[in-house]
Image: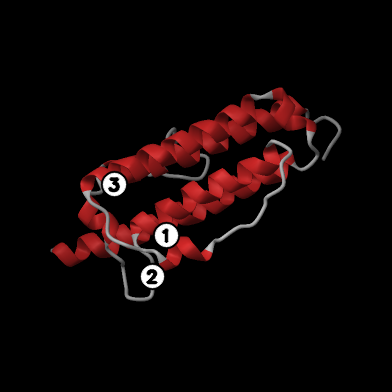
Amino acid sequence: MPANVTLERVRSEVLEFLGETFDRVRGIYLDRGTSFFETLADVTASEASKRASPDTASIAAHVRHCIYYLEVLQRPLQGEPLGTLDWRSIWTNDRPVDEGEWNELRDRLRNEAASVEARAKDDATWEREDSPWEFMAIIVHTAYHLGAVRQALRVIRAERV
């Protein structure tokens, strides 16, 4: 990293990218109205339960996975070990959701995103050498799933027409 790039600059950029990914599009890499929470705002439980094709996961499964991923990646940000992980269970337990469950999943995702943002604002988080890369992993991985959700949603909604 160039000597003139300060920790405050890195933190500021991480917060901008987190905001863009989840709910405050500023045009860094998303188009207006396409953040994760904007995308999920009008998705129904029925839509969230569907798959774009037999070989893909439902929107709800992508959200469950993102919640789990955010929970897991906060461990090293706190200086804790990752522990034993079960990535497969999210995908193999891809079941339909009702409106209550769907609202709860969106709320849980919002809470985890807020927790990650709070960690990015906490000075202690940045004492670890790997913190910038862990935040980068969170942003990039979440952006991948946002794209997958948006593509699935286009297919699912095209089937209604």
Near-viewer residue (160 or 101): 101
Q: Are marks 1 and 2 in contact (CB under 8 Å)?
A: yes
Q: Amino acid at mark 2?
A: Thr
The residue carrying mark 1 is 148
Q: CA distance from mark 2 to mark 3?
A: 20 Å
User: Which of the two discs, 2 and 3, labels the residue nearer the N terminus?
Assistant: 2
Asked if residue 77 lies left or right of residue 43, the reply is right
Q: Is residue 76 something that shows in the picture?
A: yes
The residue pinned by badge 3 equals: 101
Q: What SS does tag 1 mark?
A: helix
Tell me: residue 103, above or below residue 55.
Answer: above
Q: Quadrant of residue 36?
A: top left
* Callout 1 touching callout 3 (CB < 8 Å): no
Which residue shows up at 27% across the image and 59% down it?
Answer: 96
**Left or right for 69, reference 58:** right
Q: Residue at x 74, y 31 (%)?
A: 126
Residue named by callout 2: 56
Image vertical order of residue 159 relative to residue 133, above or below: below
Q: Position of residue 75 (x, y in %)?
A: 65, 42
Residue found 43% across the figure and 41% down from its top: 109
